[in-house]
Image: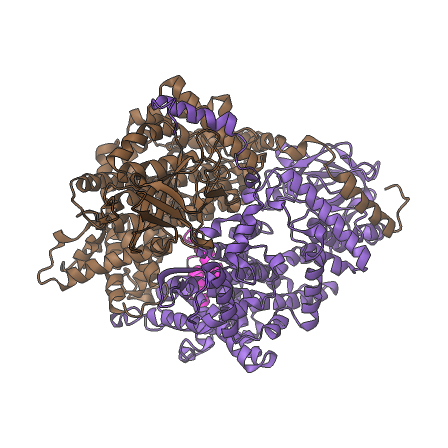
Chain colours: A purple, B brown
Amino acid sequence: MAERTTPEKQTRIDLQRARERSEVDIALVRDFLHGGRKQWEEHAGMVGLLSQDPALSHGQRLYLTRKERYKDSLRLAKRVHELQDEHGWTDAQFRKAMDNMGESSPYFLHFLAFEPVVRSQASDELLAEYSGLMTNRGIIGCYLQTELAHGSNVGGLETTATYVPQTQEFIINSPTFTSRKWWVGAAGKLATHAVVQALLILPDGKNLGPHLFFIQLRSLEDHRVLPGITMGDIGPKAFGGFAAVDNGFAVFDHVRISRRFMLSKFSHVTDDGRYVQPPHAKISYGGMLYIRSTMVTTGGWTAAKAATIAVRYATVRRQGNKSAQGFEEQIINYPSVYNRLLPIVSRSYVLMLLGRNLEKSFAAMSQGLAHGDTSLLADMHAMTSGLKVLVTTSVVQDIETARRALGGHGYSEYAGLGRIYANYLPAATYEGDNFLLDLQVVRAALKAYKRYSSAARPDPLTLPPTARYLRLLSEQSVADKATGGWADPHMSVYLLELRAVHMIREFAKHEADPDASAPQRMSRAATEAFVAVQVESFIKDLASELPGKDAHILADLLNLYLLTTVESALTDLLSFGIFPGCQRPANGDPTRELRRAIKHLELKLLPQAVGLTDAFGFTDWELNSALGVHDGAVYEALWDCVQTEPLNQTEVVDGYHEFVKPVLERGRRLAGRGGAKL
Amino acid sequence: MAERTTPEKQTRIDLQRARERSEVDIALVRDFLHGGRKQWEEHAGMVGLLSQDPALSHGQRLYLTRKERYKDSLRLAKRVHELQDEHGWTDAQFRKAMDNMGESSPYFLHFLAFEPVVRSQASDELLAEYSGLMTNRGIIGCYLQTELAHGSNVGGLETTATYVPQTQEFIINSPTFTSRKWWVGAAGKLATHAVVQALLILPDGKNLGPHLFFIQLRSLEDHRVLPGITMGDIGPKAFGGFAAVDNGFAVFDHVRISRRFMLSKFSHVTDDGRYVQPPHAKISYGGMLYIRSTMVTTGGWTAAKAATIAVRYATVRRQGNKSAQGFEEQIINYPSVYNRLLPIVSRSYVLMLLGRNLEKSFAAMSQGLAHGDTSLLADMHAMTSGLKVLVTTSVVQDIETARRALGGHGYSEYAGLGRIYANYLPAATYEGDNFLLDLQVVRAALKAYKRYSSAARPDPLTLPPTARYLRLLSEQSVADKATGGWADPHMSVYLLELRAVHMIREFAKHEADPDASAPQRMSRAATEAFVAVQVESFIKDLASELPGKDAHILADLLNLYLLTTVESALTDLLSFGIFPGCQRPANGDPTRELRRAIKHLELKLLPQAVGLTDAFGFTDWELNSALGVHDGAVYEALWDCVQTEPLNQTEVVDGYHEFVKPVLERGRRLAGRGGAKL
């Protein structure tokens, strides 16, 4: 410990020592998080291959204009197609490569928003015609839903699809200025085809609301926009987010398409213009829930990236009073730093495990739907809505919390966290604005509450998973369940469930006159109760999934998630008088024991922080952060980055002679020092 | 009300009607906020002149690379210098013009960080030599303090200034890799001179800690970096923030400067190398507090910009179910929207008024310092630290809250809020990282508490302004002070002061073992108590400053600030059992009355929202936001912006032939449709 070295070399030693001190079996935990050794090896192999391809180097991307960067992203996508041919990748492998190529791409929308909708909603005939083309990018698609004046309220869309029986065609039209399709990824410049949401108008003028139509946008010969359609890019996004995606607009001037281009798996229009209804009003919702359900896992991996960068930098950054060895303190050892970063690590783990569960539930629901069983749909809707809100809100905040914990250097583009934030941020708004989804969650909670509380003999087994907490309404003498102390995860789970019960009862009581933030608080309480129960089961399962030491560390980490969730719920718990000790305020602050338990757990986990984040398995190429480099040489990495800055390629800056020299000369003249040698 | 128009025209009508409905006397309130009619007219005149100058048009700025944008900002600065000559502006007018020219600029650092330090710390001789040059930009300066490995801990800086009595010179040197000066605005490419913080080393090797030295960086002949110095730009900032500022690095290789270049107003080194101490250890701190003290007002105006854009857009954006008139609801009428936006309006007002008070306190302290009176320094340090944390934390959050309330379009660069956020964000870190300043606030609070609570006869008149709440420790029967109900501002003020008392007592009790977030909570409680008292006095003063109607509206607005502050403090108030009704949880949620009062006040203020934000007086040119346009024509403004996007200048995108066509052809081939006409 006594050797002296220079500060920029010491960073490597600090990270090395942190790795030696960590007891986490990185390979085992990594395999666990990636769903198995085989999955990890596939992932690592793919990332290794991509990162070593010179054509996919991050290079000078930062310094391009958006127009140049867009072109470069087209180049990257072409390269990944070539790699598919070279390596004989499956479709899934190709998509994995695209997801990991290190740049956003308009092609993502083809996979996420176009192809799944066509596959799930097109008639067999239409699918037969286009399936192969979609799979192989013989056409490239986008999903034209939102309009200039309509996002959340799909019912308010203005674009029309009017059926003309004479020619058996639909006329797709943008009747107003505000009906321009807007924000549609890949529409701006790339897509050749689209699914378009439009109001279906029958020959008798009847408006049947939004339906989906398949439409070609650009020529497959020369890529020019087809007659009757006006398209373009909607301009740069805030914070430089998704610079390489061409979110675009589309305006239709009475464009005619054949009747067969209506996506008519569930409903269709007959030759003569009669409407045939879908068998179940919500049968087509399944696909809409898919994207939301994937957002839990994605959120977990995004928070994990931020946590990895921040934990590594906080381990090597030293600031404060010097020790006897002559070095300042590693900032991760300060309470204000570890208390910000360790909860982010815990949330990353929770979201990954939660995402895996959710994918299983989603598969079960989809299987049911395929047989016409819609019984799981409503609760899956509530569940994905609540989780989407909780996950995106907390991950956005976690990325910024991690960035700010880095101090000044966190504001450098080279830190990488700004980029992660810029691209993740819209998740709080797209796929359902969080504030609107809260209302869906509350509606479901209220419905479950009213049914259960008014039942003659309420049966907990009838409760949907998202409302399991309501069983506490009828179970007796539950108070003794919360006696385990904060080391027992059940203490937190019980409190979070009990809080949801009190919240929904209070909400129902004042349903006619809620305060302005009541839906947000209620939604959060319901979802956090649901998640807490899942986390308790994850903790129980750990012992059978990992060796004792790692299982214990992860159990502590998951319990930290529970404790910090309880801490964030304190206002509710205290206001309903259900927080332990709150009835006896004379004894001092009743929240102190909880906060001491959190600090205690954090101090216990602190030596594991680097191991827990190493176990995410990110490479330096994936993190693309000077502050998150695996070897800890953060200052040298920053210095290397700086050499690539275009402003540094000349000693005297471009513009000096025209714009700076005259100012300096004027100043000298005015100061009466015009001729002086300075 | 019955006429029908198109949605994009209706937006103008909506904003027009909101203006008609508002009772705010915009001219009067605007003058009040700007400090008087004369100040407003000067401001408006300046902005009018700048905005009409074609050379200062926002133009294509968004689409430039950072290098191009930097050059363009040099051009803008030269233009403002020309305007100074044309119009015979004073120095203050010139600075106002620079502040309002609509782009960040490295020149700002000359005014903010270089000139004030030289003026307050240089010897009279040095000042005589450089004063005129500084005033007229015959030299352009920067302030070299932070280093690659040192920001917050100034004591840890590594750069040295070693005195050599033989030549009467200091040798400025960067002895280590990590001692590179880093992050310094204007150092990268523009500055010709600098103040550099370096450890003063005497000939006997004694290290006297950081001192300031004046040094030339670049030649005034050809702008080349002087021998022995290596300089450059540190690269782009996160979110594209401050793109036009050249935050830079500087490395010194034994650069010799004459003894007279030490800034030696307070301490100096004699010819033969003896150190002469300053008269008071902290006498040079005054300047350091200046920037922090200006951050309150700046924060207020920044939040005001965000609030104006968001209130206008939320007034014209319609979404949801259609009314009988065929229009959807204006989104500002939804509780989840007005409950987010109105508190931001209230905080903007509070910060502006608070900033004005702070500037007066600062002037009083400075006057004292000039006569050697340092009695106000310690509390001013605590006050500016606490306010800096509170203001920057809340304004960062408010800008993002406003952006998110705009829904999807808020993520467009054209909305303008992303840009405001990107440039404001580092305020949470610079001029003292917020998490470190919290510790300063807590230290001051603890000191005041210990002194007061241990005094034989505690005298409230001895309490410094930041600790006035401690008088509640000794005043008797204060409980009856909180009986006015939520309409009475004193109810909130009393609770916020009482909370600070409980918090500091609890903090002191567990001083040896605080939980991990205790300093943050304590700092917040102390500062919010201080601000609440000020707000109460603002409310009292309103009646004498504005006519009854406007005074009432503003009183409601300021009371909304107090109520939402109490809401955010609920965990503390409940955990100490001091929130009204919390001892009787059987009566239901005790927080409901507070939340109802907030909603009630918000609904009362809602018709005034557009008037209250119009009264900030921003022009469209200043806001530079398609969603915040004064006439409400947001959709047309977005459409106009989109026409300027470089990607839209060609129908077929650059890159199609090389990178897209081959992919499509490959796809058609693989789909077995190679020859088909599609």
Q: Which of the 4 image quarters holds residue A551?
A: bottom right
Query: Residue farthest to the right?
Result: B675
Q: Residue at x 32, y 44 (%)?
A: B212
User: Residue A558: x, y in percent?
Assistant: 50, 71
The residue lying toward the viewer, choosing from B606 and A78, is: A78
Decide if residue B92 is on the left or right side of residue A201: left
| Above or below for B618 versus B518 | above
Position of the C terminus of chain B, as image quadrant, is top right
Q: Could you say which is closer to the camera, residue A664 or residue B620?
A: A664
Residue A438 picture location, percent across and down: 52, 55
Magenta stretch holds residue A503:
yes
Q: Position of residue A280 (x, y in %)?
A: 70, 57
Please state the horizontal and vertical placement of residue A63, each as a whole percent of the image: 60, 42
Q: Which residues make up the magenta segment?
A: A500-526
Asked which quadrant contains residue B119, the reply is top left
Residue for point 56% across, 74% down: A538
The answer to which of A668 and A477 lies nearer the viewer is A668
In this rendering, the answer to whether B581 lies above or below B32 is below
